[in-house]
Amino acid sequence: MATIIQDGTGTGTKLKINSEHKLEALSVNVTKINHQSQAGGKAFSLGTDGPLPFTLVAGTEHALLYVKNDGEMPLVVKVCVVSQDQAGYYRLYRNPTTGTLIDSGTATTSKNFNFGSSTVFEGSIIKADVQSRTFTDGTAITYSRNPAGVQPLDFYGSVVIPKGSSFGITFDPLVATVADQVSVFFYTYYDLDH
């Protein structure tokens, strides 16, 4: 007796087996960030909304951006894109809760990658309004030396921010004192599979 596999949606379409006795199927592979954007409008750019024009001092960590997830689903960080006029060091912090950036920075908004979605990021995004903003706690989890220019820091979706957790990023330039323009954007999505 033969087994017949149908599509289950009422069209009556049956699965095809080719002459090599293999299933024939069409599959489309997309990244999770693309899927979450297309399926539910749950992918966002979180960033500084353009360059922060500062005079930065070498040997000083300048807190640039703070993000806290208040959504029910985990927020996944896919990639961070940084841009700066001078070479320097970036540090990503887990769960900063205090510091002059958090207390006195400027609130900013998320940008949804799905232009047809009205879904907004649920949480706080605070960017530096002046140089030398700080985080006074949190744990540095990555450290990256970057040349001048635009650089991606790809986390491959491995940085996960549960509800109530936060992250922040700092920049420490290599040149002693220099006028610099720094911008930071995180490409993120809510993980609907959790």
Image (tube, rainbow, N blue to C red):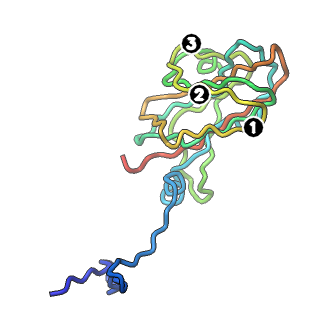
Please name whichever residue, 61 or 11, is drawn nearer the observer in this view of the structure: 61
Expressed as whole percent of the image width and height from the top left, the position of residue 135 reads 59, 16
In the foreground, 142 or 49 = 142
- SS at circle 1: loop
Question: How far from the left and from the top, in percent, is residue 39?
Answer: 48, 60
Which residue shows up at 74% across the image and 38% down it?
150
Residue at numbered disc 2: 66
Amino acid tagged 3: Thr
The residue that appears at 32% across and 84% down in the rendered structure is 14
Task: Assign a secondary structure to mark 3.
Answer: loop
Return the residue found at the far left.
1
Position above or below: 54 against 57:
below
Whichever of labels 1 and 3 marks the residue nearer the N terminus, that label is 1
- Residue 89 at x, y percent in the picture: 68, 23
Tag 1 residue: 50
Q: Earlier in the sequence, mark 2 or mark 1?
A: 1
Query: In the image, is residue 194 above or below residue 51?
Result: below
Marks 1 and 3 sit apart, C-alpha to C-alpha, by 25 Å
Q: Nearer the viewer, residue 60 or 64?
A: 60
**Amino acid type assigned to the residue bearing label 2 in the image:** Tyr
Which numbered tag is attached to residue 136? 3
SS at mark 2? strand
Measured from the top left, where is residue 95 in percent x and y? 48, 23
Left or right: where 98 falls relative to 128? left
Left of 10 or right of it: where is 154? right
